[in-house]
Image (spheres, rainbow, N blue to C red):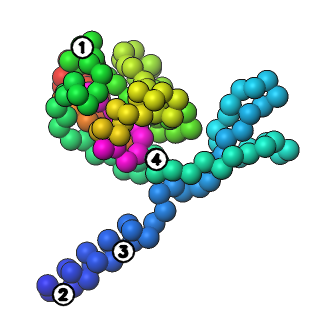
Amino acid sequence: MRHRSFFVTGLMLLSMISSPVTQGELYKWVDENGKIHYGDSPPENVKLKKITGEVSSYSSVSVEPFVFDPNLITKRSKPKSVVMYSTSWCGVCKKAARHFRQKKIPFTEYDIEKSARAAKEYRRLNARGVPVILIGDQRMNGFSAKDFDRIYYSKT
């Protein structure tokens, strides 16, 4: 029994280590008007830059206690405010923002690829994916409307 448990744990670790950080390729391009775009399906006949990095969307949701430390992140105006660290290409981030707007939940969004300050705060949080959502004294990695609402409405 003991050997079997060790074997299963070993297989799980091997699958996590060997799996890629991202599921697909991400590209950056500039259109004829100078606007920057990101996506996995670029138009033909444009100069592309393949984006590589360690940031990905969280594949599952986790919620953990979060202690505000002014040395880690910018002070928020209200202790129960919602802050989301995101990227422009993240579908889960867009889903979370849409949920907040539909429920009329005030939130502040920081794009970690467009703001050096946001990127620095994101790194200080030791985050590994997006979105990272801070709700008062809770931190949500990834997004689930059900889990978010449970946390948010229990705080207000």
Residue 59 in the image: state x and y as whole percent.
41, 51
Q: Amino acid at mark 1?
A: Lys
Between marks 1 and 2 in the image, the one whose residue lies nearer the viewer: 1
> Residue at label 4?
55
Residue 24 visible at all = yes
Q: Earlier in the sequence, mark 3 or mark 1?
A: 3
Label 4 vs label 3: CA separation? 20 Å
Q: Where is 88 relative to 18, above or below?
A: above
> Residue at label 3?
14
Q: Is residue 54 left or right of residue 143?
A: right
> Residue at label 2?
3
Secondary element type, mark 2: helix
Task: Say if the magenta span includes residue 37.
Answer: no
Label 1 vs label 2: CA separation? 51 Å
Q: Where is 119 relative to 104, above or below?
A: below
Q: Earlier in the sequence, mark 2 or mark 4?
A: 2
Between marks 1 and 4 in the image, the one whose residue lies nearer the viewer: 4
Q: Quadrant of residue 44?
A: top right
The region drawn magenta spans 126-136
Label 2 vs label 3: CA separation? 16 Å
Q: Amino acid at mark 2?
A: His
Q: Amino acid at mark 4?
A: Val
In which quadrant of the rendered image does the C terminus lie? top left
Label 1 vs label 4: CA separation? 28 Å
Between marks 2 and 4 in the image, the one whose residue lies nearer the viewer: 4
> Residue at label 1?
78
Q: Amino acid at mark 3?
A: Leu
Residue 114 in the image: state x and y as whole percent.
52, 29
